[in-house]
Image: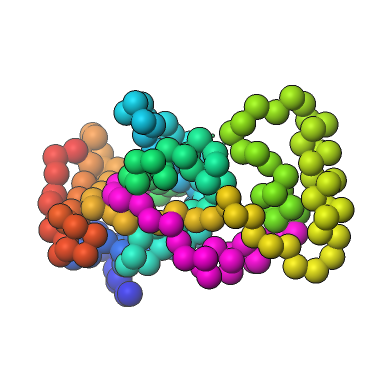
Amino acid sequence: MTVTGLISGDFTEQSEPFGLFGAWLKEAEASEINDPSAVALASVDEHGLPNVRMVLLKGYDERGFVFYTNFESQKGTEILGQKKAAMCFHWKSLRRQVRLRGEVEVVSNEEADAYYASRPRGSRIGAWASKQSRPLEGRFALEKSVAEYTARYPIGDIPRPPHWSGFRIKPLTIEFWHDRPFRLHDRVEFRRETPDGAWEKVRMYP
Ligand SMILES: Cc1cc2nc3c(=O)[nH]c(=O)nc-3n(C[C@H](O)[C@H](O)[C@H](O)COP(=O)(O)O)c2cc1C
C-alpha cells in the first residue's frame, strides 16, 4: 500500500483508509514521544454501558486492527459477549485523530502463537501470572504467582495461555481528523455496510 504526498498533500483526497492509516502511523512513529501504537479501546458490557482503556495496536492490514489481551479480563468478556468494539488514536505531536469501529473476530491460533512467542520471557510469564481485571489481595500475591509460573517454565518454550489471544476489529467506519486553524478541522470518514463491502468516503463538518 503506497500513499504519497501526505505531509504536504491533502489527505482528504485519499480513496481508501488502510494505506492512509499506515502513512499516518508511520509519521506518528517518527514524531510521537511514546507510544504511537497506543490506542483507546472501547467496548460495551451486557447492559450497554461503555468502557474504555488503552491497549497497544500490534498489527493492521485490510482485515482489520489487532491487539492482544487476556480474554477473561473485563474487555475480554465484554468483547466476546458483544462482538463489537471501537478504537481512537490521538497523535498529539501531529494533531491528528483516527477513530474506527466495527465487528470483532478472534485472531487465528497461529497468529496469536507467533506474537506470543515474540514477547519477552517476562511478559509471557506475566500473561500466565495475571488474572487480569480480577481482585488482587496485594502485590505479594502477584509476585508469588509470577514465581510459581517461573518455576513451572524455568527454561525453553512457554505455551500461550488458553485465555490469552488477540482480537481483530474489522472496521465499518474509519474517520481521519486533522487539526486546522479556528477549529475548522478536516474530517473524512470511510464507511461501508459490511466488513467485505466497498468503502464510501464522506467529508464531514468539523
Ligand atoms: C499505553 C497502554 C497500553 C496498554 N496496552 C495493553 C494491551 O495491549 N493489552 C492489555 O490487555 N492491556 C493493556 N494496557 C492495560 C489496559 O489499559 C487495562 O488496564 C487492562 O487491560 C485491563 O483492562 P480491562 O479491565 O478493561 O480488561 C495498556 C495500558 C496502557 C496505559
- Residue 101 against residue 182 in the figure, above or below: below
Viewer can see residue 39: yes
In the image, residue 202 sits, relative to residue 82, either above or below, namely: below
How many callouts does the rendering have?
Answer: 0
Q: Is residue 100 visible?
A: no
Q: In terms of depth relative to the viewer, which is nearer, 174 or 25?
A: 174
In the rendered image, which quarter is residue 155 located in? bottom right
Region in magenta: 95-121
Q: Residue at x 69, y 62 (%)?
A: 159
The type of colouring in the image is rainbow
Image quadrant containing the C terminus? top left
Say above or below: 80 vs 61: above
69 displayed left or right of 127: left
Q: Is residue 142 left or right of residue 1?
A: right
In this rendering, would 112 be left or right of 46? right
Q: In the rendered image of this protein, does residue 40 appear above or below residue 106?
A: above
Q: Is residue 159 magenta?
A: no
> Going by the image, does 205 lie left or right of 36?
left
Occupied quadrant, residue 62? bottom left
Q: Residue at x 14, y 44 (%)?
A: 204
Residue 12 x, y percent position in the rendering: 19, 57
Q: Nearer the viewer, residue 197 or 7?
A: 197
Q: Residue at x 30, y 71 (%)?
A: 3
Residue 65, percent from left and from top: 39, 57
Query: Where residue 156 sits in the image (x, y, percent)?
Result: 80, 69
Quadrant where the image shows the N terminus: bottom left
Q: Residue at x 74, y 24 (%)?
A: 137
Whether the magenta-drawn stretch holds residue 110 is answered as yes
Q: Position of residue 138 (x, y in %)?
A: 77, 26
Q: Nearer the viewer, residue 83 or 168?
A: 83
